[in-house]
Image (spheres, coloured by chain):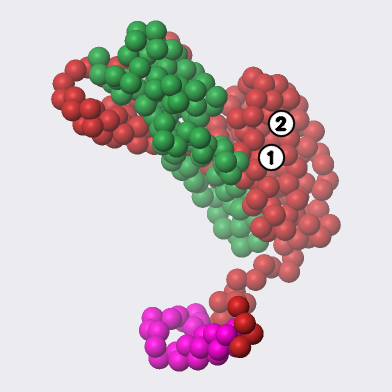
Chain colours: A green, B red
Amino acid sequence: MVGAFAGNNVFTPALAKAVAQTGMTGKICAYGFDLGPAQQEALRSGDLTGALGQQPFLQGFWPVMQLWLEIDRGISAANLDTRAQLVTSDGVEAIGSRFEN
Amino acid sequence: MSTKRNIILAAAFSLFATAAFAQSGGVDKAVGGYSWKEAAMENADTKNFHSNDGVLTFALVTHTAGNGFFDPVYVGAQVAADLIGAKVLLLGSESPTDDPARAIEILNQIIQDPTLDGLIMTTPQVGAYDDIVRTARSNGIPVATTNSFDPNILGRNSISHTGQDASAAAIAGEALVACLDDKGITSGSIVLPNDTAAGNIEVNNRVSSAYNAII
């Protein structure tokens, strides 16, 4: 096995543990979701190669602006796909430094 | 910087600004004849919307305020509120684990607040928010959803949603392939574990999305 992808923040720490327990740290390309403490630790140790944040800052910022636009300008409901922030061991120390995660 | 140097710099910038011929492509006003500045002004009635109290008050309610995951969501809402001069009430279940029932209690209370002008909520429990939407609507309060998505919520098409689409998983798929390239790995197996018993559509979509990016 050379790669693994965990589909949510529940599977991701489990994947990181499995990588550590099977001695595959740094040998396999392992990716998962969200940037919580478990994921950050796994990025530092190399159990995870990368993790995808869901840009929670936008999930607070945009709805406020959207409602204001609806009220002030009659703009109709428009969705925002917050896409993802990919973080690897290089970027793990900067996570949350501007309260964005 | 000396004052003389400041004056010379200021004069130079001012000359540049008045030499309009030097910069092409500027759009001075609308084809409709109005100025951008005037068109961009907030409507005089907006701050008195609904509660008529001179300030827009929005509430943001999440289902887990106790574990820090939603902290950036609250920060984002505060940043936006500060930018537009609105007030935002930051509310949520105190629990460090998902607690939609508590969030619904909070929602039922906040929609009775006469100063409320807009409501933003997470909707982790599909189907549980229709009455809240109904009440908000009858009170003339606009609603937006964020983070978790309820595809069938009452009035879905008139309620904006902000959240991560499952297709973002393709970003991880691409990164995974790049990682294998970097390691010079050209064959082997890639595992995309998924517990289909959980039946989580978003997770299934993410796995499909990553898989499609990988192959």
Residue drawn where x is 83% and y is 46% of the image? B114
Magenta span dominant secondary structure: helix
Left or right relative to B214: residue B108: right
Question: Which quarter of the figure is the C terminus of chain B placed in?
Answer: top left
Question: Which quarter of the figure is the N terminus of chain B placed in?
Answer: bottom right
Q: Residues within 10 Å of mark 1 (few under 14, many from 20)?
A: many
Residue drawn where x is 73% and y is 25% of the image? B94
Residue A98 sits above or below residue A73 on the image? above
Residue A25 sits above or below residue B4 on the image? above
Residue type at numbered disc 1: Leu
- The answer to whether residue B17 is magenta is yes
In the picture, residue A44 is in which quadrant? top left
The residue closer to the viewer here, A46 or B176, is A46
Which contiguous range is marked in magenta?
B5-32
Residue type at numbered disc 2: Gly
Left or right relative to B142: residue A93: left
**Mark 2 vs 1: CB contact within 8 A:** yes
Q: Dot 2 falls on which chain?
A: B
- Label 2 and label 1: CA atoms lie apart by 8 Å
The residue closer to the viewer here, B108 or A66, is A66
Q: Which residue is mark 2?
A: B92
